[in-house]
Every structure is written in C-alpha cells, then in structure tokens.
C-alpha cells in the first residue's frame, strides 16, 4: 500500500468516526468481545489494542483486567481517538493515543497482550507490522488478531449492487478475506508463525448481525468503510441502487422487517516467547 493509500485509509476512518459503531447495529462490539474472550484477559495485565477505533476491544477488556491493570489503544485516525476517549472516559486506567499500527511507538512500552480487531488487512505491510507488535510484547506475552472469514452469501448478494461502480482499489480481497493470507485460517496462522509467534491457533466464530429494517442497513453501510461504495455511485443512479438493494433485502426480511445476516470471523492467536 502506498503512502497515499495509507492516508486514504486514515482519512476514510476519520470521516466516519462520528457515526462509526453508532447507528444501533451490534457489529464491532460482539466481534471485539469474542476476541477479548479468546485472549482471556487476566487481572492486573497491561494491554495494547492496535487500531482501536472507538474502543470496542478496550471496552471488552477493561473490566476483566481490573483496576490494577491498564489498557492502551492506538489509532491513526484522530477522530476515532477522540470518540474512544469520550466513550471510555470513565476509566482511569485507559489511555488512547494517535499512533501508527505499522510501527507502534517504543514510548508505549511493553505489554502482556496485544490485540487488534479488523485492522491488519488495512496495513501496508502486515508481516512487518506483526514483527513490530512483538517489540511491544513482554516475553511470554500473547497476540490476538481478528479478521473476516468470508461472507454470508445473502449479504454478499446484497453487496453486488455496488459492484458495477467500484474502482479496482475498492475491490480489496484482503479486507473481505477472499484471498492471500487473509483468505483462510491456515493463511493467517502461517502469517503469525512466519513472523515469529508460537502456539499459533484459530478460534472461528459467526456473529449474528441484526438490522432492524432496510433503512438501518443503509445507515450501517454509510457508517463503515462501505460508505466509499455509496460515494462511488453517480448521484443520479443512487436511488436505483438503493431500490435494488432493498428489493434483495426484502427477500431475507422477517415479518417484522428485520434482517439478520451472519458475519463469520476468525481470531488468530499466538504467543511471543521473546
Ligand atoms: C474496521 S476499524 C476497526 C476498529 C476497532 N478495532 C473495532 O473493532 O471497532 C479499522 C481501524 O483501523 C484504523 N487504522 C487503519 N490503518 C491504521 C494504521 N496504519 N495505524 C493505526 N490505525 C489504523 C482505522 O482508523 C480504524 O479505526
């Protein structure tokens, strides 16, 4: 990924930060809670969450590590950092900083655990980032990384409405988990193992994502990276695309209008012996 593409990611999330994870759809929090559960936070631990966004993982971890532990989050987007600071303001043992996941600052110190949910595929050089994260771990520390594990075919069918409008850069197979190391459990495990982690393993989960109705589905898509897909549609065709999406969504709607899709994800876990 070029420097331009990197700053595009930062700008995209900055622009989204006011509505990101804030339209009433439980998406990032249940995924992050699954990562926290899988990593088994212990009382008194020092924890680093990389690409923390609004703090979904930090919120899941902070009560489990207790007042004697601490959680630090870093994110490249100042807007996300501000939101996370507001959302987690009541915790004295939480800090959120602007920082680059590709090479987290040495000033952060070292940690018992490093987590990162739905971030690694955005980075210019994921293997180098995984090695840089080791330098933030104490010997005996552990890592947990969450990525997408394919897509509910019904949800993928709805997303086909955007396809005719997407430039190649927005068909990123890494983010969708369709290709390369991000395309399989084995690929992700190899990525961690080749970066020096041991005891590498996968926990697979599938999270039910509920949209109250098609309007909430659209609000959700506009509150995540998918907003860029809406923006790729010429204005005079937006209404037609919406109508087609709503026609497909109606096929999957329950009698009350709600739609439940599944989001398969994987948590790839490993240890750093030092
Ligand atoms: C899909 S969001 C996930 C946020 C959070 N982990 C969660 O689960 O809600 C991806 C996050 O990665 C951040 N990000 C992308 N590139 C980054 C980088 N190079 N350094 C730090 N954060 C980055 C974005 O700003 C965004 O907050």
Image: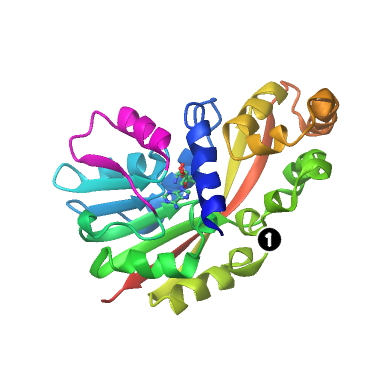
> Magenta stretch: residue 175 in it?
no
- Rendering coords of residue 220 (x, y %): 61, 30
Quick one: label 1, few (<14), some, or many (20+) residues within 10 Å?
some
Q: Is residue 185 above or below residue 210?
A: below
Quadrant that contains the C terminus: bottom left
- Rendering coords of residue 240 (x, y %): 86, 26
> In the rendered view, does 209 fall on the left or right side of 247?
left
Viewer can see residue 227: yes
Residue at (24% x, 41% y) in the render: 95
- Rendering coords of residue 12 (x, y %): 55, 39
Residue at (49% x, 52% y) in the render: 119
- Residue 260, image quadrant: top right
Q: Is residue 90 above or below residue 5?
A: above
Q: Secondary structure at mark 1?
A: loop
Residue at (18% x, 35% y) in the render: 92
> In the rendered view, does 226 fall on the left or right side of 118?
right
Q: Residue at the far left: name it.
A: 68
Residue at (23% x, 28% y) in the render: 90
Picture mark count: 1
Q: Is residue 194 above or below residue 97?
A: below
Q: Which residues are magenta?
A: 77-100
Residue assigned mark 1: 178
> Magenta stretch: residue 95 in it?
yes
Q: Is residue 139 above or below residue 222?
A: below
CB at disc 1 and ligand 1 closer than 8 Å: no
């Amino acid at each position: 990924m070029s420097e331009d593409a990197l700053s595009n990611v930062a700008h995209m999330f900055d622009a989204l930060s006011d509505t990101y994870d804030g339209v009433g759809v439980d998406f990032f929090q249940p995924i992050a809670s699954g990562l926290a559960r899988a990593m088994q936070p212990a009382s008194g631990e020092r924890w680093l969450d990389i690409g923390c966004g609004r703090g979904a993982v930090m919120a899941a971890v902070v009560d489990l590590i207790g007042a004697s532990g601490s959680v630090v989050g870093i994110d490249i987007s100042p807007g996300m950092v501000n939101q996370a600071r507001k959302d987690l303001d009541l915790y004295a043992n939480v800090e959120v900083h602007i920082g680059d996941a590709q090479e987290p600052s040495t000033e952060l110190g070292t940690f018992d655990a490093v987590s990162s949910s739905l971030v690694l595929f955005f980075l210019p050089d994921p293997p180098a980032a995984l090695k840089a994260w080791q330098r933030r771990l104490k010997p005996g520390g552990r890592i947990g990384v969450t990525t997408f594990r394919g897509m509910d075919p019904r949800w993928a069918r709805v997303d086909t409405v955007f396809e005719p409008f997407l430039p190649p850069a927005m068909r990123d197979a890494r983010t969708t988990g369709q290709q390369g190391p991000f395309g399989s459990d084995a690929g992700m495990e190899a990525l961690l193992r080749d970066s020096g982690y041991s005891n590498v393993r996968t926990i697979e989960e599938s999270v039910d994502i509920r949209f109250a109705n098609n309007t909430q589905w659209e609000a959700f898509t506009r509150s995540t990276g998918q907003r860029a897909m809406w923006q790729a549609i010429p204005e005079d065709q937006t209404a037609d695309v919406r109508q087609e999406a709503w026609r497909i969504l109606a096929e999957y709607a329950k009698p009350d209008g709600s739609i439940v899709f599944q989001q398969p994800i994987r948590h790839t876990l490993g240890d750093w012996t030092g």
